[in-house]
Image (spheres, grey):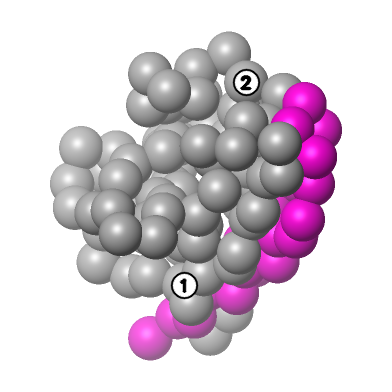
């Protein structure tokens, strides 16, 4: 069974940028869809972005559309989430996920990385 390791979280001021990375190990997920979810304190976990196994199809939550970009490098087994123009409401733990397709529920989750945006 594979493992997902997120990195790149941290503290940033509003308007700033961060790039999250998700490295896969133990097995390849190059033929699966991958995505990012997040969970803010006191709130339910929510979908952020997803990308098809070939990388050609991407999907975003309305709240991040135009600011976040998901991409993947199957040769390196890494998925990225570039986050620009960050807002305080983006503060959350961000989780990398794997699913059979972009419309399926994730079956593998990473441990999460904290993103904090100060105003």
Percent x, y of residue 70? 58, 35
Q: Marks 2 and 1: in contact by CB < 8 Å?
A: no
Looking at the picture, tell me which residue is in the foreground, 12 or 77: 12
- The residue located at (75%, 60%) in the rendering is 10
Percent x, y of residue 34? 43, 49
Q: Is residue 7 above or below residue 53?
A: below
Looking at the picture, tell me which residue is in the foreground, 85 or 103: 85
Q: Is residue 112 above or below residue 71?
A: below
Quadrant, the N terminus: bottom left
Which structural element holds mark 2? loop
The answer to whether any part of residue 27 appears in the image is no
Q: Mark 1 or mark 2: name the one nearer the start of the chain.
A: 2
Q: CA distance from mark 1 to mark 2?
A: 23 Å
Task: Please identify the quarter of the rendering in which residue 8 is found.
Answer: bottom right
Task: Please identify the quarter of the rendering in which residue 25 is found.
Answer: bottom right
Q: Is residue 2 magenta?
A: yes
**For mark 2, what is the residue?**
67
Which structural element holds mark 1? loop
The answer to whether any part of residue 62 appears in the image is yes
- The residue located at (30%, 46%) in the rendering is 46
Bounds of the magenta segment: 1-23
Q: Give the foreground label among 1 and 2.
A: 2
Disc assigned to residue 110: 1
């Amino acid at each position: 069974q594979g493992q997902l390791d997120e990195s790149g979280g941290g503290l940033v001021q509003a308007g700033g940028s961060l790039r999250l990375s998700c490295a896969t190990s133990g097995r390849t997920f190059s033929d699966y869809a991958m995505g990012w979810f997040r969970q803010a304190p006191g709130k339910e976990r929510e979908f952020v972005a997803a990308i098809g196994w070939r990388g050609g199809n991407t999907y975003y939550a309305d709240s991040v559309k135009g600011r976040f970009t998901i991409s993947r490098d199957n040769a390196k087994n890494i998925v990225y989430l570039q986050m620009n123009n960050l807002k305080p409401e983006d503060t959350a733990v961000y989780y990398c996920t794997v699913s059979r397709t972009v419309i399926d529920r994730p079956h593998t989750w990473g441990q999460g990385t904290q993103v904090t945006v100060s105003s």
